Amino acid sequence: MRANPGEGPRLREQILDAAEPLLIEAGGEQAVTLRAVAQRVGVTTPSVYRHFPDRASLVSAVCLRVWSGLGERMQAAAGEHDDPFQALRARGRAYVRFGLDHPVQYRLLLLRPVVSPHSTAEVEAAQACHREVVAAVQDCVDAGILHGDASTIALSLWATAHGCVSMLIARPPFPEPQDLDSFIDTTVRAAGLGIALNSRLPAYTPLAAAALLAARLDQLADDLTRQK
Amino acid sequence: MRANPGEGPRLREQILDAAEPLLIEAGGEQAVTLRAVAQRVGVTTPSVYRHFPDRASLVSAVCLRVWSGLGERMQAAAGEHDDPFQALRARGRAYVRFGLDHPVQYRLLLLRPVVSPHSTAEVEAAQACHREVVAAVQDCVDAGILHGDASTIALSLWATAHGCVSMLIARPPFPEPQDLDSFIDTTVRAAGLGIALNSRLPAYTPLAAAALLAARLDQLADDLTRQK
DNA sequence: TGTACATCAGTGAACGCGCGTTCACTGATGTAC
DNA sequence: TGTACATCAGTGAACGCGCGTTCACTGATGTAC
């Protein structure tokens, strides 16, 4: 099973192919040991060193692959829409869906302990992903749908979506929502609406404002229903 | 340094006292090794087994302590307010502040990998904490400030706050907000407002609704300012 | 065309490490007679 | 009051394990002469 000269990169890919399922099955980065990966590929442990200088680099390479996958998904989801708000929403849904479908990878990318920091390549991948979201928000701002600083709005929205995902995949011992999709949609939509409101509302005394809001909202709801 | 009969529980407390700073300094649960804990207390490793059946139980006991601390903080913060909405907000702020002040512990409680599940005692502590938040939301519903199912609202709000905290403590490679406090306040407040809106708005065509919303919101903002 | 040699991917054995856990023990204290 | 004994907290040495990493090596391939 020895690769010929020039065929080196093949094993590198095989190693990465083996690492991700290993990660998923065991549910954590700690399962990606050089021994386990090598055994899965059908090769001895030290061979890995021909392709990765150390374990950290191997894990980092796995992360880069996952980032690519996430970026592609969001891109593809957004591409189906002309309406910038729908495009943004599609991006959000793709993001959340990705997190729920790949909980272990999501944790690896976005919930990694501070102890094991990200490589510079990973930071670049993450920032590229974030820039695209900001651009999508900016499209909405330009279209007059959202108001305020695109970067700040993006961060708020992202924190909300991230909250849903990380809550659902970490499975903390709270009761779970019954309908996942509607829970996420409601929460993130609420964040979007709330952000739109926030940028237009002055500081206010909560109780008084709440009473006023409540009175106005019913009227607003009526108008919206009629307009449809 | 041998404890007399009857003084057993003393070492147990000392062990827990040593475990938490160890956790903090190293930035992760993996640092809480029996050896490290014992050394810190000034005792040999096997002594720990007099007080905890195994390592998992020790970690679990540390978690229970942290849950208590979190619960007390939220309780204390809420107790200062008569207005149920302000009380809820104070709870939220206390929660977020706790997470930012104790990132490693927060991660241990709420972002633990599925691989190492929570003990039944921990699940109980978490649920007690959650019940209190639901009760605080219910107070707001009763007062007419929020509308809808208290449990669902609590979960949405919690997901949003959790999103802010876990984003900020995991330090994923995104740009950070410049003003932490205002970022969190804005995001969570937006969630609250959005949830209030959501429960009153019908399904809608986003673009049209956004236009209508934008028109109405300026008027609403004016009214709120005048009322103050 | 044939031979010596360089290249390069993967091998096999071993290293030192820190870990959780087990075991028979020690020695101080309290208690029964 | 004195002695034998049970209790109980902590000890010291050792176990087996899996890990990342190192090292000299093997053996197939391509290439220079």
Image (spheres, coloured by chain):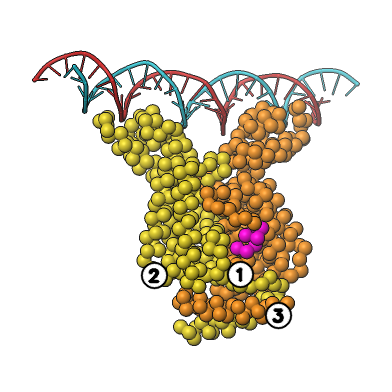
Chain colours: A yellow, B orange, C red, D cyan
Q: Which comes before the other along the chain, label 2 or label 1?
A: 2
Tell me where the magenta segment starts and ends, as one range: B181-187
Residue receiving disc 2: A82
Q: Residue at x 37, y 33 (%)?
A: A51
Residue A97 painted magenta: no
Judged by its main secondary structure, the magenta piece is helix
**Quick one: quadrant of the N terminus of chain A?**
top left
Residue receiving disc 3: B226
- Going by the numbered disc 1, the residue's amino acid type is Asn
Give residue A7's position: percent from left, percent from top.
27, 34
Query: How far apart are the two marked residues, 3 and 2, measured between alpha carbons?
Result: 39 Å
| Other residues around mark 3 within 10 Å, as few (<14) / some (14–19) / many (≥20) | few
The quadrant in which residue B97 appears is: bottom right
Q: Which disc is residue A198 wearing?
A: 1
Q: Residue at x 70, y 51 (%)?
A: B69
- Going by the numbered disc 3, the residue's amino acid type is Arg
